[in-house]
Amino acid sequence: MNIHEYQAKELLAKYGIGVPAGHAAMSVEEAVAAAEKLPGPLYVVKAQIHAGGRGKGKFKELGQDAKGGVRLAHSVDDVRKDAGEMLGNTLVTIQTGDEGKQVNRLYVTDGVDIAKEFYLSMLVDRASSHIAMIVSTEGGMDIEDVAHNTPEKITTITIDPATGFMPHHGRSVAYALKLEGALAKQAQKLAAQLYEAFTALDAEMLEINPLVETEGGELLVLDTKMSFDGNALYRHPDVEAMRDETEEDPAEVEAGKHDLAYIKLDGNIGCMVNGAGLAMATMDIIKLNGAFPANFLDVGGGATTEKVTEAFKIILSDDAVEGILVNIFGGIMRCDTIAEGIVAAAKEVELDVPLVVRLEGTNVEAGKDILANSGLPIIPADDLGDAARKIVAQVKEAA
Ligand code: ADP
Ligand code: MG
């Protein structure tokens, strides 16, 4: 789960980490009130969307010369003007895709005199089973470009969670950022605090870009992104309360409510599968046959009629779907029960695209009979390869 910049800063501040003062705002009035609470004279008005690259982003509704999604304002009146221009409009950045994201929240924050910008991120590195801290002196720009053009300027420090953060990790961070004296001490302390926040909050990813050294010699988190392990959210109701569903794919939100694991993808073949491994294999074989899956969807072990119906509705809510492949293995849940569920669901949702079903497992013959006698134009398949070939052919034929 992702959260907004202002929320991440709120969390980090609780761990003693330095962030500029600021307040969130949902309206122009709130933005003005937020600015009035800050010392000034320099304010920064920042669009709060779950995507980076806001500074260089463009608003769809404003001209090419208009300012982006991170604006320096030199008076409260300018804050009012910027807030009015940004709220409700659509910001397009390199991370939002062409459709952009509507800006519904702003963060009004202190303008900082920046002496230098750095990069620092953390993630769970599955390959080493450690927590990786990635730092670079090249902050404020696209880290992907830095990694591509000057990889030697990126340092990765890994921390074994069994032994935790050690002073030498902090020294490595300070050294990689080429900091000395009091600033190096600050960097060491910051790294320890970030590790503490990251692990205590069950974060999955934390990116600070830029981390800045101010003209006054202070290290501050100027921009940050944070995401959390969904499986651990029950331990953090305060973090869960930060969820902003308007930032998430509506179909994914709906799927979550029905305990379905759904992720929208770019293709045109909807997939309904039980089991994550089988879902991955199904997507692979669709691709092998020259088409692309429209989604990943795992209905889980208990593929009940209710779940299958919801899954159909979610798949069909995607206009890109031109055919559906159901691939279900009846283990504990028998194939005849699943077939009944598919028939009932297909009738309820008024299916208007080809549907190929591959069933395997317990009571498979009884299941196939139910599908064949349903009166629905369901295309049966014998195995996964057959199923993929059939649905791809159906979709190509219709096109
Ligand atoms: P994004 O990465 O989405 O473009 P940032 O918060 O990193 O957004 O802002 C882009 C740039 O704007 C930063 O690299 C920094 O130079 C400047 N900036 C952001 N916040 C402030 C601030 N509070 N004071 C001064 N400059 C800022
Ligand atoms: Mg940034």
Image (cartoon, rainbow, N blue to C red):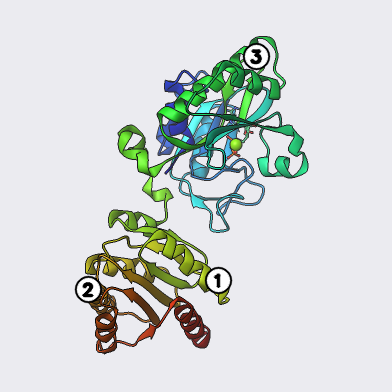
Tell me the quarter of the picture where residue 383 sits: bottom left
**Which residue is located at x 58 percent, y 37 percent?**
70
Please say if 295 is above or below 126.
below
The quarter of the picture showing ligand 2: top right
Q: Amino acid at mark 3?
A: Leu
**Which residue is located at x 29 percent, y 88 percent?**
372
Q: Is residue 81 visible?
A: no
Label 2 near ligand 1 (CB < 8 Å): no
CA–CA distance in space, label 3 to label 1: 52 Å
Which badge, 1 or 2, is on the more N-terminal residue?
1
Please say if 65 is above or below 302.
above
Instruction: Name the residue carrying label 1.
Output: 287
Q: Residues within 10 Å of mark 3 (few under 14, many from 20)?
A: some
Instruction: Name the residue carrying label 2.
Output: 337
Residue 337 at x, y percent in the picture: 22, 73
* In contact (CB < 8 Å): disc 3 and disc 1: no
Q: Secondary structure at mark 1?
A: helix
Left or right of residue 209: residue 272 = left
Q: Residues within 10 Å of mark 1 (few under 14, many from 20)?
A: some
Please say if 209 is above or below 327.
above
Q: Secondary structure at mark 2?
A: helix
Quarter of the image where the N terminus is located: top left
Q: Which mark is residue 183?
A: 3
CA–CA distance in space, label 1 to label 2: 29 Å
Q: Secondary structure at mark 3?
A: helix
Which badge, 3 or 1, is on the more N-terminal residue?
3
In the foreground, 143 or 286 = 286
Q: Residues within 10 Å of mark 2 (few under 14, many from 20)?
A: some
Left or right of residue 301: residue 122 = right
In the foreground, 258 or 273 = 273
Q: Amino acid at mark 1?
A: Lys
